[in-house]
């Protein structure tokens, strides 16, 4: 849902194709820190000196100085992380999860591996340096968890956030047959997973012949949403097809694309899809906000979240109209660590609802097209010999994280896995990545 969400996912992926290291023996000023590392990195080598700086950056009181970070970033790495706003962005995301407690460091001639924990989750930063001593690679990721049982699964999930649910189901005749679940009745935020309902409404209307894939949608400055996505960067008046918008809504979680489709279908039509796709209590999501309204109501300057929390359905209708008339001014000081879902500004469902929604897409009137779109970003890396198909939709907002996974095993059996998390503050880079690694590893338990 958020700029931060997009950066998390892309930042990790981009860094994985590179290696990062620092100028050894730099004479830059020390980085003030509020958390003394439990393990002291040996700074006698260039790669050690840089990893010591990185550790201090991700534990400092203030955000890393972009000029200092850029000074030690090599040109190839700088180009790779430019779409993220530079290497300072993933460093800041790691700092948001502080304390990051170092546990060990392994140094090679031109590379280093820093082991640390954040929120009790073991993680690793892998770095490398070029011949000129600048960083040419950086990868921060949680260590892959060992999930040998559902007890292991629950222990791992509880590290991500205090409120969570998980479900694993076999799909039989479009119905979810539960294999294992935890807190499956808990009503938790969806983030961008709510876009499954938009996709379902759209593809059902296309099957009915009332909407065409090639119909044009017009991007307007006045109605653009915030990232994630790409369409918000297009000039006012640019047209995109319904197909392009649908693919970007799912594969890139494009918020502006989502709002264009909701507007084209009509909010009432998307709301009706909640019942069609098996949501047990559609009233918790009606009236349904679009993504721009989410940002304005939850994080606008000033926000409208208290009014939303206290309003009845008619009052919420008026707040949606009020949000449409306001500019998209986000209060970033109030953004990351103040979840709007605490005031009901989100989209909500339980694990059974999410499974039913994914099951409908997988077996309903437009199953073939839905499966194609869901597979554009599979979410996890599964062994293709064991799992020849995988589809996915994830979502997050400050304090909220969710994922819905559809996978087909070698026998042709469909499986659906769901995860949802809610915390009082931000769910940071490492815990977010860890949650999806847990889901990936837990597929081995399904049989």
Image: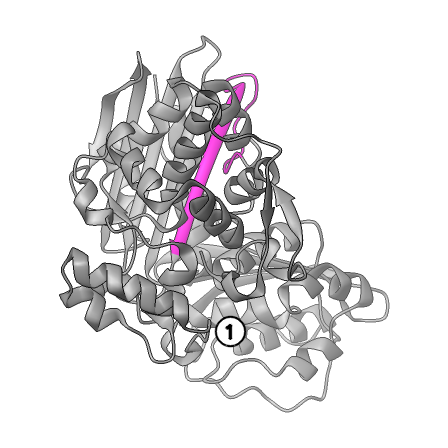
**13 left or right, relative to 443:** right
Is-magenta flag for residue 389?
yes
Is-magenta flag for residue 244?
no
Instruction: Please say if 225 is above or below 65.
Output: above
Q: Looking at the image, which is closer to me, 126 or 85? A: 85
Q: Kindly indicate the quadrant of the structure image that contains residue 409.
A: top left
Q: Is residue 262 visible?
A: yes
Q: Position of residue 127 (x, y in %)?
A: 66, 61
Q: Looking at the image, which is closer to me, 48 or 406? A: 406
Q: Kindly indicate the quadrant of the structure image that contains residue 38.
A: bottom left
Q: Position of residue 233 (x, y in %)?
A: 64, 61
Instruction: Please say if 101 is above or below 141.
Output: below
Residue under the image location 36 percent in, 29 percent down:
358
Crowding around mark 1 (Cα neighbors within 10 Å: few <14, some 14 to 19, many 20+) is: many
Q: What stretch is highlighted in magenta?
A: 378-396
Count of marks overlaid on the render: 1
Element at label 1: loop
Residue at the farthest front position: 210
Residue at the farthest bottom position: 29
Quarter of the image that includes the C terminus? top left
Q: Position of residue 121 (x, y in %)?
A: 39, 55
Residue under the image location 32 percent in, 75 percent down:
303
Residue at the farthest right position: 131
Circle 1 residue: 58
Q: Position of residue 101 (x, y in %)?
A: 43, 68
Quarter of the image that includes the N terminus? bottom left
Instruction: Please say if 358 is above or below 312.
Output: above
Q: Is residue 20 visible?
A: no
């Amino acid at each position: 849902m958020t700029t931060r969400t997009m950066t998390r996912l892309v930042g990790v992926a981009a860094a994985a194709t590179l290696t990062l290291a620092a100028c050894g023996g730099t004479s830059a000023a020390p980085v003030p820190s509020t958390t003394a590392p439990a393990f002291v990195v040996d700074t006698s080598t260039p790669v050690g000196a840089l990893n010591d700086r990185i550790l201090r950056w991700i534990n400092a009181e203030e955000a890393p100085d972009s000029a200092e970070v850029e000074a030690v970033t090599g040109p190839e790495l700088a180009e790779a992380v430019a779409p993220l706003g530079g290497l300072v962005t993933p460093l800041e995301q790691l700092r948001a999860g502080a304390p990051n407690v170092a546990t060990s460091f392994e140094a090679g001639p031109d590379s280093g591996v820093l082991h640390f924990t954040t929120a009790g989750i073991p993680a690793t930063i892998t770095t490398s340096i070029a011949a000129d001593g600048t960083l040419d690679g950086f990868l921060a990721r949680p260590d892959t968890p060992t999930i040998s049982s559902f007890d292991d699964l629950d222990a791992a999930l509880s590290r991500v956030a205090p409120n969570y649910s998980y479900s694993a189901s076999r799909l039989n005749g479009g119905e979810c047959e539960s294999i294992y679940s935890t807190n499956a009745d808990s009503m938790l935020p969806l983030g961008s997973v709510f876009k499954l309902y938009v996709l379902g409404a759209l593809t059902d209307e296309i099957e009915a012949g009332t909407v065409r894939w090639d119909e044009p949608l017009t991007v307007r400055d006045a109605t653009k949403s915030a990232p994630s996505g790409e369409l918000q960067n297009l000039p006012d008046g640019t047209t995109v097809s319904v197909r392009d918008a649908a693919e970007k809504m799912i594969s890139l979680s494009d918020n502006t694309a989502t709002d264009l489709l909701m507007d084209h279908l009509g909010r009432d039509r998307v709301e009706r899809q909640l019942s069609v796709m098996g949501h047990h209590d559609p009233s918790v999501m009606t009236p349904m906000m679009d993504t721009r309204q989410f940002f304005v109501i939850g994080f606008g300057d000033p926000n409208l979240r208290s009014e939303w929390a206290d309003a009845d359905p008619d009052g919420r209708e008026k707040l949606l109209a009020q949000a449409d008339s306001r500019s998209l001014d986000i209060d970033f000081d109030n953004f990351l660590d103040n979840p709007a879902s605490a005031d009901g500004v989100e989209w909500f469902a339980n694990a059974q609802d999410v499974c039913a929604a994914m099951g409908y897409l997988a077996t309903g009137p437009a199953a073939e097209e839905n499966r194609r779109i869901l597979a554009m970003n599979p979410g996890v890396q599964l062994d293709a010999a064991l799992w020849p198909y995988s589809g996915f939709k994830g979502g997050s907002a400050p304090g909220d994280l969710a994922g819905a996974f559809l996978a087909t095993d070698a026998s042709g059996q469909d499986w659906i896995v769901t995860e949802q998390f809610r915390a009082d503050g931000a769910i940071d880079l490492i815990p977010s990545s860890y949650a999806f690694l847990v889901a990936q590893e837990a597929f081995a338990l399904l049989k």
